[in-house]
Amino acid sequence: MAAIIDGKVISLAIKDELKKKVEELKEKGIQIHLAVIQVGENPASAVYVRNKKKGCEYIGIGSLSYELSEETKQEELLALIQELNEREDVNGILVQLPLPSHIDEDTVIQAIDPKKDVDGFHPQSVGALCISQPGFVSCTPAGVIQLLKRSGIEIEGKECVVLGRSNIVGKPMSILLLRENATVTIAHSRTKNLKEVTGRADILIAAVGRPKMITRDYVKEGAVVIDVGINRDENNKLCGDVDFDDVAPICSAITPVPGGVGPMTVAMLLYNCVESIGLRA
Ligand code: GUN
């Protein structure tokens, strides 16, 4: 049976480290503030936003909350971002995605000052990541790297297969693994012989958004399996992209859903908020 990688325990360790750093910064007269913007009432987004604000409170960061109506115009949102860009006391700006369809996400992301882009979604942050320059790294993939490292799983030289090519997870995930000297393959919906490709992985990262798609016939015996998916199954129960009960008996380590990657996203967002002090200087 596989070792269960506990994202709750690892994220708590990170948050406790950050809490100490925030206290030290406060002693130097530096207080960090994160602005969190949600447009509309997507119930999943509301849960994520609440967890992010709770995380801020836990480590001692102030959070400014903007809950805007579904009808908010793009120009109004851009004006708010501009105001927050200019505020000295705001260190990070987070616009929860998805946005209502009348608002262009790319335009909104690009309006955020890259020095406050704690989500790591701005093209400047993504470019910096690609060429190993200082900048914010997208929270979920950064969290996966921490889960692996803090579980004592070596990445260097390993065959890593990332299943999914989104801008938020798949692409930055592959670059972070490359930075750790892994051999990286990105597989996706058009990949031929998918089981053969994923079956080569020493470390398999599933980020496709299809409930329980990854069964044991996609996985090499003894592989490490990281499940980034957050889906609902046929009984409306939270589940990942991996069929946990089927895969766990044949792999060496696996993340559960919930309690795996999810809590790490919040921990790495808080890490980026603390990091913003250094990037500003
Ligand atoms: N929607 C789903 N995941 C994320 C995230 O990490 N950041 C933001 N801003 N929106 C999201």
Image (cartoon, rainbow, N blue to C red):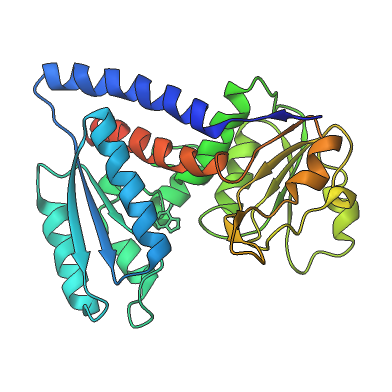
Please provide percent x and percent y for residue 221. Answer: 89, 36
Where is 209 relative to 265, above or below? Answer: below
User: Is 193 located above or below residue 218 in the figure?
Assistant: below
Residue at 50% over, 26% down: 9
Tell me the quadrant of the picture where the N terminus can be found: top right
Q: Nearer the viewer, residue 184 or 100?
A: 100
Count of marks overlaid on the render: 0
**Residue 281's quadrant in the figure?**
top left
User: What residue is shown at x 35% (from left), y 46% (from top)?
Assistant: 51
Q: Residue at x 8, y 23 (%)?
A: 29
Q: Horizontally, is 193 left or right of 45 in the view?
A: right
Question: Which is nearer the eye, 184 or 274?
Answer: 274
- Please, is residue 162 above or below residue 39 in the view? above
x and y, in percent, of residue 98 in the image = 41, 68
Q: Is residue 241 left or right of residue 109?
A: right
- For the question of whether residue 104 can be seen, the reply is yes
Where residue 61 appears, x then y in whole percent?
Answer: 21, 34
Does any portion of residue 118 appear in the rendered image?
A: no
| Residue drawn where x is 60% and y is 24% of the image | 149
Indicate left or right for 266 with 10 as reference. Answer: left
- Place of residue 97 in the rendered image (x, y in percent of width and height, measured from the top left): 39, 63
Q: Quadrant of residue 54?
A: top left
98 with respect to 146 (left or right): left
Which of the 4 quarters of the picture holds residue 177? top right
Q: Is residue 188 above or below residue 252?
A: below
Q: Quadrant of ligand 1?
A: bottom left
